[in-house]
Structure formats: C-alpha cells, structure tokens
Image (spheres, grey):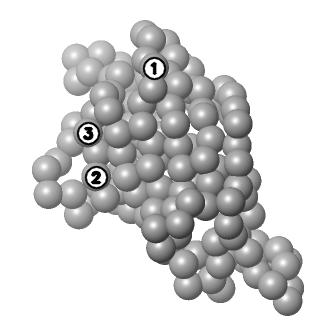
Amino acid sequence: MRYILLDRITAVEPGRSARGLKAVTLTDEVLHDHFPDYPIYPGALLVEAAAQLAGFLVEVTENRPSAAPRRALLAQIDRAKFYRPAQPGDSVELFAELAQSLDAAAKLSVGADVRGEKCMRATLTFVLRAVDSERVHAQRRYLYALWTRELPDKVWLP
C-alpha cells in the first residue's frame, strides 16, 4: 500500500516555503480503526503528509535541470507536537518552511492547521541522495505534476 497523503500543493517558493492540502474523509481506511466511535486522523500521518510536502520543497530547491535528480529522504523528526485532532470533513492546511539548507541535507519547520487552529508542528531533517532508478524518478515526476497542476506559476519538477 502506498501512503500518498498530500492531496495538492497550493503554493511553492523554492528555497523558502510550500503550502498544501490534505482532505480528511471517512474513506481514509485508517479512520475505521482510529477510533471506531471517535474517528481522528493519526498524528503520525499528519507528520507524513507534511513530510511529503517538505520533501517536495527540498527537491525543487536543491535539484538542477542540468544534473541527475537527487531525492529527499526523511532522516529525522524532532519536536513533533499535536494540538488538536483532525477529523472527517476537515481540510488540513499544511506548510513547510526551509530553516537550513546544506548541499546534501535540509532542515524544515512543518505544520498542519485546521480552520486556522494549530493542529501539528514539527522539525524535519532530510538528506539528499542519488537514486539510480528511472522508475522512481518517473513516479515522482508524475506525482509532483498532479500535486502542482493548479499552481498559477509552473515550477521545474525534478
């Protein structure tokens, strides 16, 4: 099973920040067991949704058209805090802000809000690695094209 949790990227400024959306619906299978009489979206999956957005930001920031793309791999999660639950019907607004960038690593502040209320905050560290698989690159390009299809200004997709 694939966990593609980010639904759409709504804004991106390479080298700075990205914003995206995750719609929580009763069709999310995890809600059937978490919890049967009080469905809430797991905090760990909110972190993963934000990590998908952050990984995209790292890749569009650090990769160049003239070189083979490197892929962002989540290496560390720090200070993850959860403030309120996300429930069916919620549109979770995600953000990722680049805090520090080196040639082969990046640290980002990420978060999730529901109706303007703080839901989750964390600090994520990614490493950039060469991946020798055209299949992986093709899958990423396809996914990134879907996520960004409604952006007014197109970004280069690694």
In the figure, 147 relative to 24: above or below?
A: above
Mark carried by residue 13: 3
Question: Residue at horizontal 85%, vertical 79%?
Answer: 35
Q: CA distance from mark 1 to mark 3?
A: 15 Å
Q: CA distance from mark 2 to mark 3?
A: 7 Å
Q: Residue furthest left?
A: 153
Mark carried by residue 11: 2
The spot of residue 119 in percent (x, y) is: 61, 61
Question: Residue at horizontal 43%, vertical 10%?
Answer: 103
- Specify the amino acid type for callout 2: Ala
- Specify the amino acid type for callout 1: Gln
The spot of residue 31 in percent (x, y) is: 75, 78
The spot of residue 18 in percent (x, y) is: 36, 45
Asked whether 62 or 83 is in front, the reply is: 83
As helix, strand or loop, the secondary structure at mark 3 comes to: strand
In this view, the mark in front (2 or 1): 1
Asked whether 57 or 17 is in front, the reply is: 17
**Is residue 44 shown left or right of residue 49?**
right
Q: Residue furthest bottom?
A: 37
- Specify the amino acid type for callout 3: Glu
Q: Are marks 2 and 3 in contact (CB under 8 Å)?
A: yes
The spot of residue 5 in percent (x, y) is: 56, 60
Residue marked by disc 1: 100
Q: Are marks 1 and 3 in contact (CB under 8 Å)?
A: no
Q: Which of the two discs, 2 and 1, labels the residue nearer the N terminus?
A: 2
Q: Is residue 135 visible?
A: no
Classify 10 Å Cα crowding around label 3: few (below 14), some (14-19), many (20 and above).
Answer: some
In the figure, 84 relative to 32: above or below?
A: above
